[in-house]
Amino acid sequence: MSPATESQDALASAVSAVNYRVMSSFAAKQFSELASCYTNEAQVLVARMEPILGRASIAGVFTYMRKHIHTLELATSNVEGEGDTAIEHGLYVHRSVDGEVIDRGKYLVAWKRIQDQWLIHRDMIVSDTPSLGAER
């Protein structure tokens, strides 16, 4: 295995571990823990909304989401990086308490390594569910 491949494998493992923390924290309603997976200057970008800025606001959004969504599932399609930055794209699914799919879509995340810890810096979410947000 080349050093570059090994480095990409380590990056993929690190991203997977943080994504697992996000999903577990969401399920356990530990929104401060979930927000700690983001940088202090993080932004969550969602269609038809102003950017959600910083850990406290991000925790608040996930607290609100959890009232309507029971599970958050993330599946990385690809992650690649160089130095202290990385880009991940993948698919997400939100389910109700009875397991019904409420929403599904794609995401794009910009990661930053800060003091040897990979954190989410920009998180863009695009729903594939036509009815979500279509009406005003």
Image (tube, grey):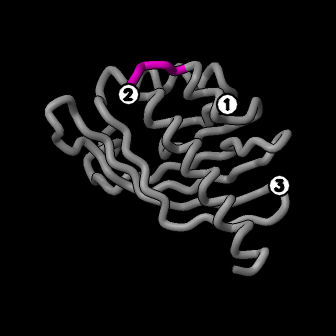
Q: Foreground mark, 1 or 2?
A: 2
Where is residue 57? Give x, y as percent.
Answer: 61, 22
- What range is drawn magenta here? 27-31
Task: Indicate the quadrant containing the C terminus: top left, top right, bottom left or bottom right.
Answer: top left
Indicate left or right for 115 with 86 as reference.
right
- Per the image, label 2 sits on a secondary structure element best described as helix
In percent of the image, x 31 and y 41: which residue is there? 94
Mark 1 vs mark 3: in front: 3
Instruction: Report the residue marked by disc 1.
Output: 53
In the rendered structure, the answer to whether residue 43 lies left or right of residue 102 reads right
Q: Give the answer, above or below, for where 61 lies relative to 22.
A: above
What is the x, y in percent for residue 29? Answer: 42, 19
Rounded to the nearest angstrom, the CA distance separating label 1 from label 3 is 21 Å
| Residue 111 percent coordinates (x, y) | 70, 50
Q: Residues within 10 Å of mark 1 (few under 14, many from 20)?
A: some
Q: Residue at x 81, y 44 (%)?
A: 116
Could you tell me what secondary structure mostly forms the magenta stretch? loop
Q: Residue at x 73, y 65 (%)?
A: 81
The residue at the point 75 percent across, 41 percent down is: 117
**Between discs 2 and 3, the one toward the N terminus:** 2
Decide: is 113 above or below 61.
below
Residue at far bottom of view: 2
Which of the marked residues, 1 or 2, is nearer the chain's N terminus? Answer: 2
Q: Which residue in the protein does label 2 denote?
A: 27
Query: In this rendering, is residue 63 above or below 127?
Result: above
User: From the image, which quarter does the N terminus lie in?
Assistant: bottom right
Amino acid found under the numbered disc labelled 2: Ala
Q: Is residue 87 magenta?
A: no
What residue did someone put label 3 on? Answer: 84
Q: Secondary structure at mark 3?
A: loop
